[in-house]
Image (tube, rainbow, N blue to C red):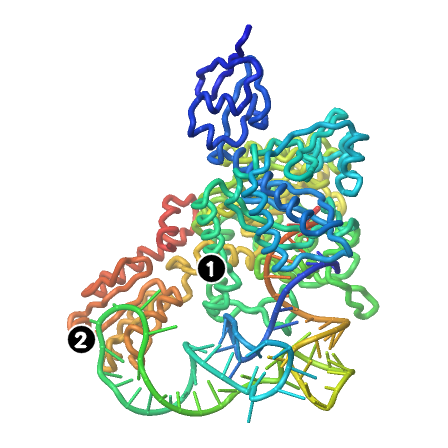
Amino acid sequence: MSEITISLPDGSSRSLPIGATGADLATDIGPSLAKAALIVTVDGVGQDLSRPLHDGDSVKVVTADFEEGLHTLRHSTAHVLAQAVLDLWPGATHAIGPPIEHGFYYDFELPDNRSFTDEDLEAIEARMREIIVADQDFERCEAGSAEALDLFAEHRYKREIIEKVTSGEADKELSGEAASDGVVTYYRNGDGFVDLCTGPHVPSTGRLGHFVLQKVAGAYWRGDEKQPMLQRIYGTAWGDKKSLKQHLHRLAEAEKRDHRRLAGELDLVSWPDALGPGLAVWHPKGALVRKLIEDYSRTRHEAGGYDFVYSPHIAKSVLWETSGHLDFYADGMYPPMELDGATYYPKPMNCPFHVSIFQSRQCSYRDLPRRFFELGAVYRYELSGAVHGLLRSRGFTQDDSHIFCTPGQVPDELASLLDFTLSVLRAFGFDDFQAKLSTRPIEKSVGEESLWQLATDGLRSALESAALDYVVDEGGGAFYGPKIDVDVTDAIGRPWQLSTIQLDFNLPERFGLEYVGADGGRHRPVMIHRALMGSIERFFGVLLEHYAGAFPVWLAPEQVRVLPVADEHQAYAESVRDILVADGRRVTVDPADEPLGKRVRAAKVEKVPHVLVVGDDDAANGTVGDNSRGAEGPERDLPLEEFRSRMTTAVESGAPVAGPIANATSFKEQGS
RNA sequence: GCCCGGGUAGCUCAGUUGGUCAGAGCAGGCGCCUUGUAAGCGUCAGGUCGUCGGUUCGAAUCCGACCCCGGGCUCCA
């Protein structure tokens, strides 16, 4: 046999001479593909174009249009980054440099423990471009471990990887960096630059170039805070100039949506230095939106069979000892206060209080499930570097509930809980969900196997009946029970983890919770912790970014602004306002002491959904000119009655009170 | 907590090598203008240059400590 047969993704097959490579295959298919090809996948596994194919291989020629192609391109760009850094700083050493979403990074240690500056980034980028222009081949090599250790004698992190990999101790992250089976693979290019790597890589550096270096950051070696802090350089890389440009544009757009920026611009929330990190104050407009969100939450919970409860912000240490928080969560708690000989802690969670309420009287199975709901403010000592606007703060309010039920009630309770969760999130314009089911950890956990089984099956069938996309994190659950986390995708495609439904077999045990069953005996209830928005503050921040500050009408702090054309229309403007206010709308009048254009602009900048301009014609005819957010231009001579009824429709469709939401997408349109 | 970069008026920022460097625009106050859909004109007021210490004849500028902010890392049972 002098030929091999290769099958292609479209089901066709091709014959090539023995010894033909991926590059040969691409050339055989067509010249433009040959030019665009970066690697091939053989039976789904990436491989350099220069490597030979074998008879019967199922091969895909991969270009930058495929995820694997971009991945390789970014990985190869990371190699060039390392090459440039090692060129420019003799004595520098490189650690790991993987591709990541949208780009890549590489970790380094520089001589004398120095770090990179912004000017360094420019120099590195310039050197990288020289390497790319030189069009150096990426050459795949193999070595025994002793030989490899010798090759990387000057590079302690590479040696550590080789040792870990060859002894079989490598974790997932490291094994991608080197090789397997006693053979170490590495790549060589240019004048002797070598890097440990399993590949594959693009054929030569000339295939790269649509990249920018973005930032320098510190990163612990192997992500362990006990290990040395390395210098990480992040970059982004794409297959062509246009994609790179688009990506940079998206980053700029995301920055414009930053909730911290919008919170200031729209006068919603601020973080005075005097309060301390992670602690915000809510200005009237922000507080109004927050109140609308909270009111909606309360209304839904009231209709959903929840009992409202309240609990204090601090409690004696015994409560936290019983709950176990002082054992496994002390680092996250604010420090204690000594009062009257007792030790009090600010609460990091609401659950022990709700448990206390459950304990306050004897309970029959007929009373279950009991669902306690509280917008409970908690305080957590987040690391100073972790604090981030409203998305990660030290004081926040959970839309927290604890449900106590019998084991038999668990499946139904979970199913209705998940429906409830999704329905509430949809009301805020989220309709793209991704869930994660976390199951029993392999190592220590509490609770009987049958209970874990029941709860995990319950969660799974709830996910399935809600037709929700989900992934399973095997063994990823907490030691005390399985859980579901729900992510939403926002208007520009970013995921946010909001909701959690967490089973707890531990707290009922620790507090000795009981109910009296139908058999007259005492039984232990199952407890479910759940938060839908998670934290009201964080949810508000996510909404602000989701809507880019343009809240839908039902949430907008100011729904309508009336602008009289001149002073003589002030009285009519006020009468329009009064009529709308009587309808329950939030309306202001901006008097004519500035030019109309300026006042229109101010209202637009503040993202008021409806700007009504009223002049002579309007006062005479009972009309308004509606310049609504997102519309192409103003709508003149609109009868006020018509505007009122449109507003009623808009507000009512925005905040459904109960049950499944039929037209969830409509709010998104209003928000745009 | 760790690495890097920052902190000048309410906001956004300019301030060269230490020496008329306390500045601009917007926002705010007061006048004028009376406007038909995204910035009218004039004028006034505003700052312990994050804080505290140091170097210097002299510090927004140099040094140290601390506070706060940003980007990462770690963390988010």
- Disc 2 is placed on an element classified as helix
Where does the N terminus of chain A fall, quadrant-wise?
top right
Residue highlighted by disc 1: A256
Residue type (three-letter) at the residue carrying disc 2:
Asp
Q: Residue A545 location, x and y as percent? A: 48, 56
User: In front of the other: label 1 or label 2?
Assistant: 1
Tell me if mark 1 has few (under 14), some (14-19) or many (20+) residues whose alpha carbon lies within 10 angstroms of its own. some
Residue type (three-letter) at the residue carrying disc 1:
Lys
Could you tell me if residue A585 is visible in this image? Answer: no
Tell me if mark 2 has few (under 14), some (14-19) or many (20+) residues whose alpha carbon lies within 10 angstroms of its own. some
- Chain on which label 2 sits: A
Where does the C terminus of chain A fall, quadrant-wise?
bottom left
User: Which numbered dot is residue A616?
Assistant: 2
Q: Earlier in the sequence, mark 1 or mark 2?
A: 1
Which residue appears at 28% of the width and 70% of the height? A579
Q: CA distance from mark 1 to mark 2?
A: 39 Å
Q: Residue A274 location, x and y as percent? A: 64, 74
Which residue appears at 35% of the width and 69% of the height? A603
On the same chain, marks 1 and 2? The answer is yes
Q: Are marks 1 and 2 in contact (CB under 8 Å)?
A: no
Q: Is residue A273 left or right of residue B2?
A: left
Question: In front: A252, or A595?
Answer: A252
